[in-house]
Image: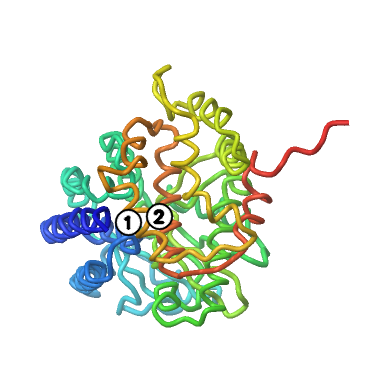
Amino acid sequence: MASEVISAEVQQRTAEHLFRVLGQLKGGAMKFGQALSVFEAALPEDIAAPYRAALTRLQEAAPPLPAASVHKVLAEQLGPRWRQRFRELDDKPAAAASIGQVHRGVWRDGRDVAVKIQYPGAGPALLADLNQLGRLAQLFRIIQPGLDIKPLLAEIRARVSEELDYELEASAQKAFAKAYADDDEIMVPRVVAATPQVLVSEWVDGTPLSTVIASGSAPQRDLAGLRLASLHFSAPTRAGLLHADPHPGNFRLLDDGRLGVLDFGAVARLPGGHPEPIGRVARLAIAGRAQEVLDGLRAEGFVRGDGDIDAQAVLEFLHPMLQPLIADEFQFTRAWLRAEAARLADPRSPAHQLGRQLNLPPSYMLIHRVTLGSIGVLCQLEARAPYRSVAERWLPGFAEPAPVG
């Protein structure tokens, strides 16, 4: 009971701090709100509900660009004859993006398209907001008490800055679309045209993942969770990239059961796939091979130097986090994530103390953030699925090695 009280107090202070910072951010407010929304599943409902409401107000507060401003951006980016590229273009935006808005149109060849247009001046405003990121450190410490926040925030700054370049995003989207062409689980829209501030892609119909979370049936939520896990584990192997912005607004559940994936502005480049030590150490931990787990973590830089650290304590620290990969089926829930957050946040718990002795190497920074984000979405979905089998198929080092001879 004491640990739960302490955790709730810490979470309450963090949530209040978050609301204040979000209220002060300008051009990048929605981007940060989207990135942080995946962590609401770790907060008690009386805290999470006001946060969701604040994020909704934040999204609705972005005024749409007037049609004249939209046309001006299109003329600057696509040329003065930009209208000839479209059969139709709805001047009213269909959706707000984090640093722009999306319009529905019909391309000259008859394809339905989504036209993402960056807000004029979004770049300088977003970069100015990056200076506020340090004030969000407390939220991340709830999830990982021993995390060195400075390199994480530096990584977020770098990735957010990349999202200003729609041509760079188009390159990543093309790689994903090629990797998942004709796939029966994942659908990635093809790029139609791209400039630094305008990105035209094929339109994707389907049920937004936020709707599935709010009112979807259990089978829908389970299927969406399985598809999301498949994307997370398979993309580095298939595309050499990890989709690094796993918030619900970037996914659609299609009528044919596939997961439609949107927004490739933030990606982690993993040309060799997920690092093999991730899967290997997870497999060894599940098997209870404590010393080998400690050796593997030390070799990758998760344990600093040769300091004295108890291998069995490390195993006990990791084991609850690995529950989704232990059972043949696992259901992610908000209650499970809140229990993990409480375990790590209570300063008197062994997990909290050990967490302060561990390190997060910079090379794993983005993978760690995306994994946490994906888990947050899975807990919002409360999805049950055979996640272990997905990891065995796609996560290097996780499956038991074939016997020699």
Quarter of the figure that contains the C terminus: top right
Nearest the viewer among 382 and 20 is 382
Residue in the foreground of this view, choosing between 29 and 64: 29
x and y percentages locating residue 119 in the rendered image: 25, 61
Q: In which quarter of the image is residue 25?
A: bottom left
**Amino acid type, callout 2:** Gly
Question: Residue 391: x and y, percent?
Answer: 62, 51
Q: Are marks 2 and 1 in contact (CB under 8 Å)?
A: yes
Disc 2 secondary structure class: helix
- Left or right position of 223 against 41: right
Q: Mark 2 points at which residue?
A: 373
The amino acid type found where label 1 is placed reads: Ala
Mark sitting on residue 400: none
Percent coordinates x, y for residue 96 in the rendering: 30, 70
Determine the residue positioned at 48% across, 52% down: 243
Q: Name the residue under label 1.
A: 35
**Viewer-nearest of discs 2 and 1:** 2
Left or right, residue 183 beside residue 221? right
> In this rendering, does residue 103 appear at all?
yes
Residue positioned 27% across, 58% down in the render: 1
| Foreground residue among 43 and 137 | 43
Local crowd size for mark 1, using a 10 Å CA cut-off: few (<14), some (14–19), many (≥20): some
First in residue order: circle 2 vs circle 1: 1
Residue at horizontal 33 percent and vertical 53 percent from the top: 341
